Image (tube, grey):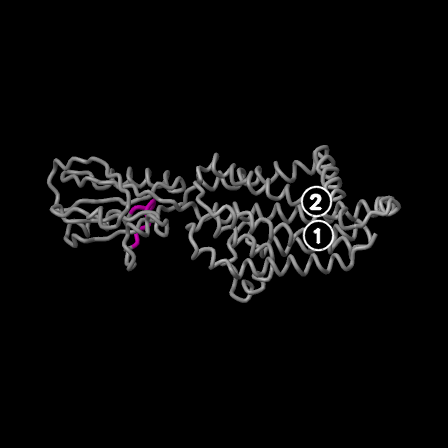
Amino acid sequence: MMKTWIFFKLRMLQLKYDKTALFFCYVFPVILLLGIGYPLQLQSDPKIEVYYQDFAANEESKATIALLDAQKLLELKPYEESIPAYEAVADNDVKRVLTILAQDKQPDLTAYGVDLEPAQVENEKLSTISLHLIKNDIDENRIENAALASAIDQLVSGDTEIELDQYTLKSDRLTSYLVTLLPGLIGLTLMIIGFNGFGSVLIEEEHHGLFKNIKTIDVSPVPFLAGLFLSRLLVSHSVAIGLCLVAMLVFGIKFDFNIPMFFLVVTLGSIAFLGIGLFIATVSPSTTAFNGIVNFVQMPFIVLGGVFFSVSLFPDWLQYIALAIPLTQLNVAMQKVLFEPNDMSVISSMSLELVVLFSWCIVSVVISKMKFKW
């Protein structure tokens, strides 16, 4: 244990003065998160998608729908789902719903148990209908919602003015892309640390004769590898926590996740990649060969691992292949931990991801230990 601690401190001191490694561990992932995530937070689609419900079903409501549908900026679709519109908007399954009611009817805002903040609107001019725009408070939709409200106000105003009543739903859901990007970048960084921060270090030290020098002082490879292993494991956890903090401060994401499950997923993912990195180092005859093998392994991992886009976009047969990749399972598990409700049902739904990650940990570490030699 003492020898492991000594090697661990040496590795941390070594990492402290390695500016390149620190950049790729801590700075580069943050640059990717901000550089990709922030512009996508602000961009809007060419057309603003609007679902509508026409409960008035009179001539004026139909004329209003036709007027809105004729605008190039808007894309109107009837809302025909069985789930109440308020719930769909709160979950961000639908970004916004325009409800059209007869003037003497008002929406039941308390029936859905959602925190609503209605705008105060005075209907001074007569109209047979009233418009109610239901939206959520997700930043992703803020610009579109403002543009839509302005467009509706301009289109329906006339001799007989139809007032637009707006309601904002409190939502804990985030943009779909950030839900993919943040776990993906955490997984990508853990993979880089495992392959390049662990396996690459070992292969370079071996070819510089360090293994032979350490062997002369009669030290087992176990504390030597354990010291490097633990130092990279500590870096992996700090990177994962750091990216989550950046997401909280920059994007306003509010996390309410199970902390032990978060550390379990990060630990399993880190061990799996560290084991794979060690295995590649043991089978590589040279540093050049190691880099070639790592590039050969990393590319399909990144493409099929759901780092920058969801695996659900793949054909079914390709999704089955992707399920065997540890990066895919790590990203899926991290999504569930960070963004799903914090209850036992979510934990039980992660059984496949945890089993696959645990299997990669056992297989990669056991095989690497058998093949590693001074």
Percent x, y for residue 371? 78, 59
Residue matched to label 2:
197
Which quadrant of the rendered structure holds the N terminus?
Answer: top right
Residue matched to label 1:
277
Q: Quadrant of residue 254?
A: top left
Q: Toward the viewer: 53 or 285?
A: 285
The residue range painted magenta reads 71-77
Which residue sits at x=55%, y=65%? Answer: 320
Q: Are marks 1 and 2 in contact (CB under 8 Å)?
A: yes
Q: Secondary structure at mark 1?
A: helix
Seen as rendered, the residue at the extreme bottom is 317
For the residues labelled 1 and 2, the Cα–Cα distance comes to: 9 Å
| Mark 1: amino acid | Gly
Q: Secondary structure at mark 2?
A: helix
Looking at the image, residue 222 sits to the left or right of residue 215; the answer is left
Residue 2 covered by magenta stretch: no
Closer to the chain start, of discs 1 and 2, is 2
Which residue sits at x=22%, y=46%? Answer: 109
Looking at the image, residue 73 sits to the left or right of residue 161; the answer is right
Looking at the image, residue 37 sits to the left or right of residue 201; the answer is left
